[in-house]
Image (cartoon, helix red, strand yellow):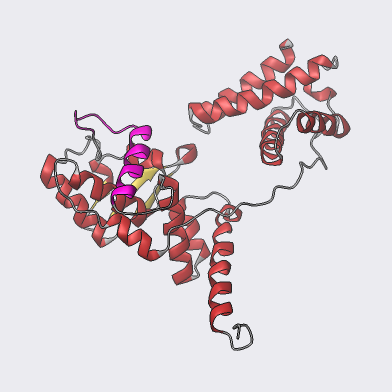
Amino acid sequence: MAEALADGVARFLDHLAVERRYSPHTLAGYRQDLDKLARWMQARGLARFDALTPDLLRGFVAAEHRAGLSPKSLQRVLSTCRSLFRFLARSGALAHDPAAGVRAPKVRRKLPQVLDTDEANALVELPAEGTLGPRDRAMLELFYSSALRLSELVGLRWGALDLDEGLVRVTGKGGKTRIVPVGRHACAALRALAAAGGAAPDAPVFVSRHGGALTPRTVQARLKTLALRQGIAKRIHPHLLRHSCASHLLESSGDLRAVQELLGHADIGTTEIYTHLDFQHLARVYDAAHPRARRK
């Protein structure tokens, strides 16, 4: 990578790591996208980011598209480039916006699969039997109760829970902290878990057989096992419980802002996908109940 390009990318990634507190996984994704841009520029003799123009950037996007990158991935790459250009402009290293007017191909938005309320109840009402029973029941209840991300659940410590008030403090993407409700069933399951194994403030809430904090991969595998045990036919994963919680809350309340706050979405546009899920429910009710929609 040319020295000027490498320096700009390095300063940008340092900014994301130190000031924005992005995770190593997220930083690796940004680095991969920017490496693609830098290689494409070098192949065309472009040694500095201020040599880029909107037309050249469109050429980069088109080249990645021809190479097989999906519209969704192209949108991510272009978003990464825009973030870099804004950073360089703020630091005075870029006098124009090479991404002005550049658009990636449209992505057909895929709606997340959700459990219906009966399926969700059947999954979380797991008998708290055996050594792992209290842990597994509390884990399922908390996922569905508070719409936690997988990383938030495995990183949870007892000191972040206030079971008397029914609240949990979690640190989500970008190091942002939020406080979300914990339902009464989840509180009861967590109290049972604390009684079974202790609850020192700095100790992880969910631990393995050997006492260490659960890993994301272990939680994913465990959820699949528990779903089969409970007779759930759908492919169960942590984000499915998060989606289900958000969808069921929005369906009952209609309060999109509250659901956004619960999920920790920076942009309400991310949360709006659940309005589409809610519309699907409305359409099914309409087709089944409206006199002019019912089939003879």
Question: Observer-nearest residue: 129 or 256?
Answer: 129
Question: What residue is drawn where x is 71% and y is 23%?
Answer: 36
Specify the quadrant of the image occupied by residue 180: bottom left
The location of residue 295, given as percent across then percent down, is 61, 82
From the image, give the main secondary structure of the stretch colored magenta: helix
The location of residue 137, given as percent across then percent down, is 24, 50
Residue 230's place in the image compared with 46, above or below, is: below
The location of residue 274, given as percent across then percent down, is 54, 60
Left or right of 156 on screen, residue 292: right
The location of residue 145, given as percent across then percent down, is 34, 57
Q: Quadrant of the C terminus?
A: bottom right
Seen as rendered, the residue at the extreme bottom is 291
Magenta span: 208-229
- Is residue 181 visible in this depiction of the protein? no
Question: Observer-nearest residue: 9 or 220?
Answer: 220
Specify the quadrant of the image occupied by residue 170: top left
Does 213 lie within the magenta span? Answer: yes
Does 265 lie within the magenta span? Answer: no
Left or right of 26 on screen, residue 229: left
| Count of numbered circles in the view | 0
